[in-house]
Amino acid sequence: MTKAMQVQLVETAAAETWGGDKALLSFSDNGATVHATVHATRATGGPLVAAQRAARRLDGMGVAAVQLSGDGWDLERRWAFWAGYFNPRNDNRLDWGTGDAAELEELNAREKAARWVREITNGTPEEVSPRVLAESAAALLHDLAPGAVSHKIVAGDELLQEGFVGIHNVGRGSVREPVMLQLDFNPSGDADAEVDICLVGKGITFDSGGYSIKPSGGMATMKSDMGGAAMVTGGLALAIARGLNKRVKLYLCCAENLISGHAYKLGDIIKYKNGVTAEILNTDAEGRLVLADGLIAASEQEPKWILDAATLTGAAKMAVGRDFNSVLSFEDESAQRVLDAAAAENEKAWRLPLEPFHLEQIPSGFAEIANIGIDGSPGASTAAAFLARFVRDQGRNWVHMDLSGSYQPSANDLWAAGAKGHGLRTIARFLQES
């Protein structure tokens, strides 16, 4: 078995031979030291970023096992190190280096949820079909709360029978049937208990763009288009592990967006369960079409809050990059709840605009709305406006998260390539405090 490298964190400078106060790492016979000095962290963003960057460097050096040691580590610094040390290509082993029972419980809960999110999102589109995604999410949550979780999977033509036409239309081009996971976390056991919160996640397990086909460069990472479904599941998993005592219903809208003789086409019109009709002007704007079904189902429960999450638009990434997730809501209070949750969990989130006039920027000559906005309209905002048509009262107590920061196409100094899990802690905190 590989011997673990001892890694400590200090706020003093390295020896001059390692670069002095500009050095992030130094080494000795005893292991490695992360130097979170004022000078070194000014460029990196503080000790948390220093810990994560150091972890990436150690992974890049092939260090396969680490034990955190010394007094310089606290809960958040340990977690930042894990976030950077995780690599889907390597089976890196990390000893948290703490005997504090409460700290270990929280770290292990975070790791279980985040590892599931990162691994299911990084799975190949051949391995992770719509049904596999739904079944895996259900299994994770049943394992955490076996007596409090029940679920149902609605698949194939059953979707039409229950009125979930968006998921069915997007997924009918694939030989692998589209599905909706309907999961109920009900810790009270009372079947008549009110639903506190509904979560809705986009679960497009592969997105070719359909007949509005993506170029290869844009399609290469589209196994990650189920990141919203993964993130709301992971967020609920972490909240349950933290002792969540609210009734939450989870809706995952899962499909493959492929091309075939049976695939949906530009010019098609979908009539939803709530009566809204939507014209298809771009089959690559499919995420909003499947989320609409989940939002209708969520609204029927009349919960206190609805939150959906999706890797929905390139426009959001253009606006905030890959370090922030985007938050959109008509209501200041609703948006602020998510922003506050992100800040409390050391995750980055940024509010993008959503106003009633954005509803006017998705017109159609043949239906009530189109699935893309008019030329020059803000893509993230009009996508959210589309979703609002399927939320009770066109958006009451509803927040949409466009997961701009959830996936890293190639490794950088903070993250390995692939899913990051960035956002699940925000959702967990939102569930706990809303």
Image (cartoon, rainbow, N blue to C red):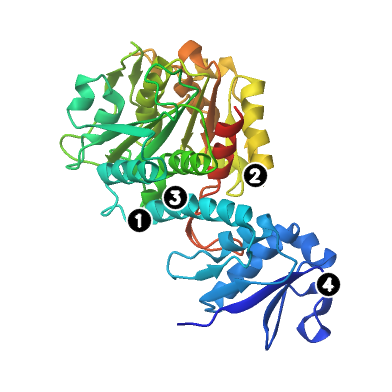
How far apart marks 4 and 2 lie (CA) works out to 26 Å
Q: Which residue is mark 4?
A: 12
Q: Counting residues from the N terminus, which is met first, the one under dot 2 or under dot 3?
A: 3
Query: Could you classify mark 3 by the number of other residues whose Cα lies within 10 Å: few (under 14), some (14-19), or many (20 or more)?
Result: many
Q: Position of residue 10 (x, y in %)?
A: 77, 70
Is residue 78 positioned above or below 125 on the image? below
Is residue 414 positioned above or below 244 on the image? below
Image point 57% across, 44% down: which residue? Answer: 425
Image point 52% across, 79% down: which residue? Answer: 62
- Quadrant housing the C terminus: top right
Q: Which residue is mark 1?
A: 123
Task: Name the secondary structure under disc 3.
Answer: helix
Q: Counting residues from the N terminus, which is met first, the one under dot 2 or under dot 1?
A: 1
Image point 68% across, 34% down: which residue? Answer: 340
Q: Counting residues from the N terminus, which is met first, the one under dot 4 or under dot 3?
A: 4
Q: Which residue is mark 3?
A: 117
How far apart marks 1 and 4 lie (CA) works out to 41 Å
**Residue type at mark 2?**
Glu
**Residue type at mark 1?**
Gly
Quarter of the image for residue 250 reads top left
Q: Which residue is mark 2?
A: 345
Q: Position of residue 27 (x, y in %)?
A: 69, 83
**Residue type at mark 3?**
Val
Residue positioned most to the bottom: 29
Q: Residue 423: tell me if it is visible.
A: no
Query: Could you classify mark 4 by the number of other residues whose Cα lies within 10 Å: few (under 14), some (14-19), or many (20 or more)?
Result: some
Query: Could you classify mark 2 by the number of other residues whose Cα lies within 10 Å: few (under 14), some (14-19), or many (20 or more)?
Result: some
Query: Could you classify mark 1 by the number of other residues whose Cα lies within 10 Å: few (under 14), some (14-19), or many (20 or more)?
Result: some
Mark closer to the observer (1, 4): 4
